[in-house]
Amino acid sequence: MNWKRSLGSALAFLFLSSTALAQGRVSGSVKDAAGAALPGVVLSDEASGTTAMTDNNGMYSLTVSANQATVKASMLGYVGVSKTVTLTNAAATANFTLVESAVTLDDIVVIGYGTSNVKDLTGSVVSVKAKSFQKGAFSTPEALILGKTPGVRITSNSGMPGAGSRIRIRGGSSLNASNDPLIVIDGLPADGLGLLNPSDIESFTILKDASATAIYGSRAANGVILVTTKKGTANSAFHADVTAVTSFRNVTNQVDVLSTEQFRNVIAENGTSTQQSRLATADPNQVTNWQNEIYQTGVVNDYNIALTGGLKMPYRLGLGMYREKGVLKRSELKRYTATLNASPSFMNGKLKANTSAKVISAENFYANQGAIGTAVFFDPTRPVLSGDTAYGGYFEWTMPNGAPSALSPRNPVGLLMLRDDVGYNTRALGNILFDYQPLASEALHLFMNVGGEYSYTHGNTFVPAYAAMNFNNGGEMNKYESTRTNRLIELYGNYNKQVSNRVHADLTGGYSFQHWSSSSPSYASLNAAGDTISPANPNPFFSENALMSFYGRGNFNISNKYLVTATLRSDGSSRFSKDARWGLFPSAALAWNVLEEDLFAGQTLFSNLKVRMGYGLTGQQDIYNDYGYIPNYNYGTATAQYQFGNNWVDILRPDAYDYNLQWEKTATTNIALDYGLLKGRINGSVDVYRKNTFDLLGVVPIPAGTNFSNRVLTNVGSMTNNGIEASVNLVLVDNATTNFEIGFNASRNRNQITKLSLVQDTTSPGIQVGGIAGGVGNTIQIHALGMPMFTFYSYEQIYDATGRPLERNGSLDQYSDGVDVNGNGKIDDIEAYVDQNGDGIINTSDLVAWAGKTPEPRQIFGFNANFSHKRWSGGMTWRAEQGQYMYNNLSSNHGNYFEVGGSMRHLNNLVTDYLNTGFRSPQYLSSYYIQEASFIRLDNLYLSYNLGNLYQDKYATSLNISMQNALVITKYKGLDPEIAGGIDNMIYPRPRVFNLQLTVTL
Amino acid sequence: MKSIKLFSLLAGAALLAASCAKDLNLTPKYGLNADAVYSDPNNYINVLAKLYAGLSTSGNQGPAGMPDIGGIDEGFSQYVRVYWNLQELPTDEAVCGWNDPGVPELNTMTWNDNSSFVSAMYYRIYYQIALANEFIRYTMDEWLNTKDFTPEQVAMIKDMGAEARYLRALSYYHALDLFGNVPFVDESDRPGVYYPEQISRVDLFAYIEAELNDIEALMVPARAGQYGRADLGALKALRAKLYLNAEVFAGTDRYADAMAECSDLINAGYSLEPVYEHNFFADNHTSSEFIFVATFDGQHTRTYGGTTFLVHSHMGGTMDPAYFGTTSGWQGNRATKAWYDKFPDTLDTRRLVWLDGMEDTITTVGTFTEGIGITKWRNVNRDGSVGSEPVTFVDIDFPMFRLADVYLMYAECAARTGTNLSQGVGYFNMVRERAYGNSDHNVTTLDLPTILDERARELYGEGHRRTDLIRFGQFTGGSYLWAFKGGEQFGISTSEHYNLYPIPSSDLISNQNLAQNPGY
């Protein structure tokens, strides 16, 4: 904001003309949508062409030539407003409120270690500002930009309060290292977004290609997200903004399970005598819908107050209090935040200390999520309460001796109500960016950035001894604690100057050192009475790593026509041995502003046409293991000792290691076109990229006997990601009263593994991943050569003529004719699953890696529409993902008769899919359960009304209602088609949210 | 001036902070690296304990959490459990009803080179070997000469080195028995990127024999060392097993040598435990007949494998958990009728079965209540009290070698060589007398079929059956059938190539020097 206003003022000054012959004066104030004064706005008289500018208080006085004058207020970055006034006694008042317009070419965006004009960018950078954010109440901030940018896939982890999301930029490029982008908050590379208060965020800038991210070198391979929090503006008066949001949230969908009546019928038809007699012990009139019993209407109250000002020193203090009761009973989140941004300056403005500090304190009551899955399959003929006092009064399955039956599920409501799990986290992060201008010339600035982060978490759990869930141990009383810190110091300089007539140079160079540590003590686990169930480990957990870097970047602007960027960064990480420690990450990019060429001078169709090309190398060093290259020995725990005579001896074990461990490297090529038509009313870009990751880290099998395990983390593979992203924004209406814009974005990414083992081999199926519930050790996905990561891997199911899947030894009369191919009167293995290699048996060699079926979508789309008309504004955001698949683990695990429970002491309900398949025993690895999960979602819908100033030119107020997760359209039959990882084993449901928001500026 | 001073102060502070922080050589705070470990003689016992614990625990955290081996459920990968599965499930002594990947094909002898349990055993064996190699390296003169240890410490370390070589020989013996032709690594092979050569079964046999002969002098005399550690008795028992099966392993007749080893063991001071079932109780560490064990303890040595697995997997149906000294049955294993029919009457105290609620003929492998319930392993003490951890983890130690086995081995060698027959009959009868409590069921002559069946009655569920059936030519082929052998309800003949397990496909791919066993 700072930059915009000063730039605006500077430009405005150029246009100021001398006063013409005065006939009258129009005066008044210009404010922005929030009610803050806008200095530097240009007021012009349409008839005479005279102009004036608003002062620091947003006040102006303009001479006009006629009694009826049309005054126009305009400023860079805002929608121009005209008012017609009639003068009385040669004077009139006209007050303006200016609303920010769509991204213009003269916008400034934050990039690594600095800022840049959008016009001058050579890399793939997208900035989303606060006015474009989704509207509503959010516990974590990444939801603000859902659907706003092409190439960025954000999948929320669940509907749990504070659950956060998984963010992927241009597909993931790692198998074993993290696929998360680097998050930089106000210049501090931070430990994730966490519970940062969304109300404090000004913008997200997403750096996608290598030339934009290369300045972050070894951490940039998955992209970088720069988060900028709101700051005060210079020369503005103090004001306070108060926002209050109340939100109601409800689960709108349930897993389809058999109704009580259907359940009784299924048991009556198929049950053994044990099962029928067990069913007979239930009250025939009892009908329980367990999913209803565990959910409630969630409520959120979110209060934020922001105090901003900046007559001498721009500052903003944001305080927030967020409280959410989740839709699962007992789940609760309380978040308190304080964000302070201040930029005091010293030495006559030569030294600025841009300070940013955030404190986030959260208290999370974690409702027992085991209840979510259990509520799906708990017997619907049983009551919630038993009428007895045992087990807290809840109905539980018991053995003849009265103790809880060991392998039976526990009462879902009992699980929720009898388990306490509270976690507290305090996170403080901040940094001071010193900006010193040593010489008189503005061209040279020296910077020092010092900052750090400290996060302390502790929590405890408690289950009383009488609860069924931990009955044999006598309940549970545990605590946990962990601390994470990081500290940063950076020194760099920036030289920014028009060096000759044609060339403008912007050079940056510097040094950075960051150190992370994470520790947690080990506590014994106790039961409710305090007796030790298993002792603490002999040592606490402690891990640390450090990164040292040198970097430089040159941005050259040649006659505004050609833009050249070159970056080089060298990183040294403590995670690798001395021989592999340092990596060099170069990049180069070119851009051509086509319209600046003389050839195109005077054309009016295009307002902007830029071609960009870039290439760069970035790294990934987030390998979850700080000491992977060191031959390290560790003691075993007190429960893994060995008996020698009468003594218990602690064991000491070497870890498998690879001395030659090194960075993953990704080489990215990006070619793009940015365009604008019809004075920017149509604008957008198209990016085509190719990412090639090599020295991919993977935990792979190694020759037996050559190391201290059968697998080791080593650099083994390579992978490619190819894709295209496109976005179009259309400003359909833009005039004094009305503004209507729509935007589309679409992206497509293809991922493929090109090398996967120490030995180049095509006969191995690959590395199996994707564990599922049901049995032990079953996996449903595979990393295979020539296929995308996490490709689904299963048997190929055979269906009868009506589409019913066949089951080995299934009774023939449920299928259509002709299914018994060999006529032996039963369904054999090879009649239920396709025998891929024709050897007459179905075994692991007949598993198929389904090339087209992965959990990642082929295409992602976003659609935004926003309008404003006089006092009203509103908008919606749609998001679609197409081409991804989901393994319906709930159906595979609870959609077969075996799961009802045979010789166990309980009966379990089944999902309705059982009626489709009639499976008598689990068929976990059938392709029937790999289902398409494309969807279209209405993420956000909002309507605002600006009440204006309520009293005496003050108290600007606006009201806003919005909905989040309003609608999902999908063919997927499970609960929610959007589950990160592609395996649906029940998630904490995402509720539909309805918000009411009131904002007042004091 | 003030401003320049201010800034230079800041700049100076920054540079100071930066230079202090120039350390990128970070090492773990709570671990030790190899050289530090072996520079302190007191640490050797802890690494040796890990070598032994490799037989009992599945990782560094009991019962699970820091696994030794990846790619398979941690409980599944525990040594005794997976060895038991490979030695018992494909035989008449056990059938498992679970659907977990790898289990069904073991029951029916239809496995291939992708079987997860075959893989788990293979990598578990080589885990032991690789760790033993590392330890042995640090007990050799090349290392010890660079250190300042006292002569007593050096002697103690070398004795520990002998124990490590024993454990390595034990694992190689299992490799010899299960896989035959395997990759070979010893202490000269350091961790790194290389491709071990394959050794033939005959050569591996010779290597194990040479190793055992080499360390014999360094082993503690039988029953003289600490409980749980290998001694001369353990060495002789292993050598006896090696010679007994020499025809299968190396095509040579070494029954006379086996008999000599057995003879030494019989005179070493072991004696049969008076009550058979006490050998499988929670306090079986007091048994007088154990020669070498893998120890387990409910408080200190916890795992989901080992004897915890043996107790829980055999429980289910109408069995009362309190009888077993624990809670919760996992409803997995039971025996076949073919095995049970070897008991001629109900007087044999080794007949520890549960028939209530059980159908003796198995029609569906997945139904626990079909088959013969086994109650051999129980987490109770002789006085009736329950083991130290009454909920899940048991105290029962797993006997790898015990005296009754040695008596029967002697009898078998006598029958095969035709020498020392009266001694053989005498030892056989000692086993019978302990089983019946009287001499009414003694024999006067020896014949091999009776000896094989006696081994089934005495040693069932202790991980010997497959090796025994192969030695008698009855594991594969059609001469002896049992429920679901080959996948058919009453059993069918299976191919001879199943006498050896396949090298896992993952190692064939990682190491191009290996060739697969025939038939796979």
Image: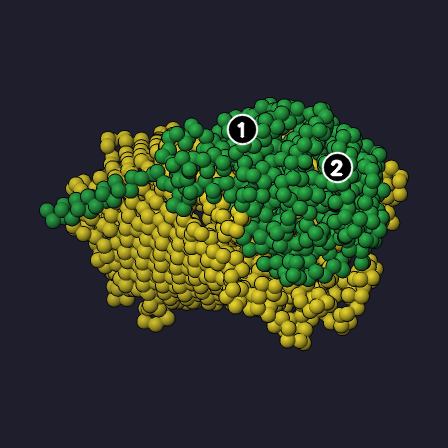
Residue A474 lies, in percent from the top left, at 57, 66
| Viewer-side residue, A629 vs B427 | B427
Residue A106 lies, in percent from the top left, at 35, 44
Circle 1 residues within 10 Å: few <14, some 14–19, many ≥20: some
The residue shown at (73%, 56%) is B316
Kind of residue at disc 1: Asp
The residue shown at (34%, 72%) is A951
Residue A774 lies, in percent from the top left, at 67, 50
| Viewer-side residue, B202 vs B33 | B202
Give the chain letter for green. B
The residue shown at (49%, 36%) is B159
Left or right, B457 with reference to A757: right
Circle 2 residues within 10 Å: few <14, some 14–19, many ≥20: some
Nearest to the eye among marks 2 and 1: give it.
2
Q: Label for residue B423?
A: 2
| Quadrant in the picture for residue A65 | bottom left
Q: Chain of mark 2?
A: B
Give the alpha-carbon distance from disc 2 to disc 1, as whole Å: 40 Å
Left or right, A892 with reference to B418: left
Q: Label for residue B93?
A: none
Q: Quadrant of the C terminus of chain B?
A: top right
Give the chain letter for yellow. A
Q: Chain of mark 1?
A: B
| Number of marks in the rendered image | 2
Q: Which residue is mark 1?
A: B186
Disc 2 is placed on an element classified as helix
